[in-house]
Image: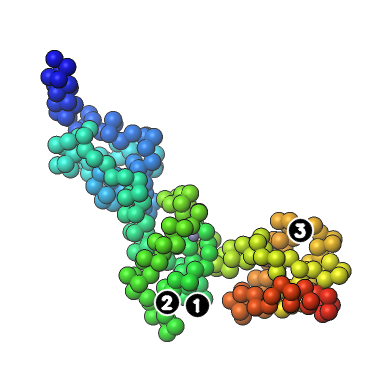
Amino acid sequence: MAGWLDNLFKTLKRTKPLADALPEMLDPGDPRVVIRPFGDDWLCPYTGLRVMAPDWNGSSLTLLQTPEIRDHLLAQPMLQEKSLEAPMKTFEELVSICVFQRIQAGGNYKFAAREGEWVCPYCLTKTETLLRNWDGSEVEFKFYFQQVLKHFAGCPEYQEDPIGGAKVVEEIKEAGGDRAKLWRYLKSDPRFKVIGPDGAWLDPFAARTVAKLNLKREPWGEAIQGKILDYLLSNECPGKYSNFEVEKSLAELQQAAVTKTQSY
Ligand SMILES: [Zn+2]
């Protein structure tokens, strides 16, 4: 008896009109139902197609009140046939579709630094992936796409929020890739923490102490690190000429800090 009852329920479930089944199919708590690749659209989690929906406010609660979205769903033969049983794509699949479209579209996903290096829109790191050749021509999509995906696979900021975590072009431009890189060095590379006998901080690119940045007057922390960062990115520091790569060893810099007391 349980068997035929079960089948009956299954049939009833399937034959529920699609329009009535939609609220149940698109659970407002499911992150897959609110993906917007470009902010004026909606990524259908069933078909993986981008539906233009500029008037939708992005909330899962108003999703089915948006005519473009509703019309798209109701027009799918696969959904008409299977409704509640229709398979939804996985979050990973939908993220891939969304990110692929964004990279192709360019903008913040295709920002190149001075030498054409791609800057990750999530962690703002300047990578070794080139978007531009030495002659200024563009590198073909197929040559950098895999490298971009490889970076994302190991990028903590991307992993945390692949849909909403990308920064806008202005922020990426401001960081230029260098700020994030230098910030990392300041936090982890001891060559960025060398001081002279008077406490003046040593510029590891110039191998000279900088009088106005004094670690005896101001303790090592985010405040002084912020000032050092501003200095490193300014024209006073020669770091940009070596692409912000320190060429001297820690021992050489420690030596420079005591012998060359020349401050500026
Ligand atoms: Zn990244």
Q: Quadrant of residue 90?
A: top left
Residue 115 got which mark? 1
Residue 220 got which mark? 3
Q: Earlier in the sequence, mark 1 or mark 2?
A: 1
Q: Where residue 255 sits in the image (x, y, percent)?
A: 79, 76
Task: Judge whether 230 appears above or below 10 on screen.
Answer: below
Q: Nearer the viewer, mark 3 or mark 1?
A: 3
Which residue is under mark 2?
Answer: 132
Task: Judge whether 61 appears above or below 43 on screen.
Answer: above
Answer yes or no: is residue 12 visible.
no
Residue at x 32% of width, y 70% of height: 142
Q: Earlier in the sequence, mark 2 or mark 3?
A: 2
Residue at x 22% of width, y 29% of height: 20
Task: Judge whether 177 appears above or below 88 on screen.
Answer: below
| Kind of residue sitting beneath label 1 | Glu
Q: Where residue 254 sits in the image (x, y, percent)?
A: 77, 73
Task: Judge whether 140 appears above or below 188 on screen.
Answer: below
The secondary element bearing badge 3 is classed as: loop
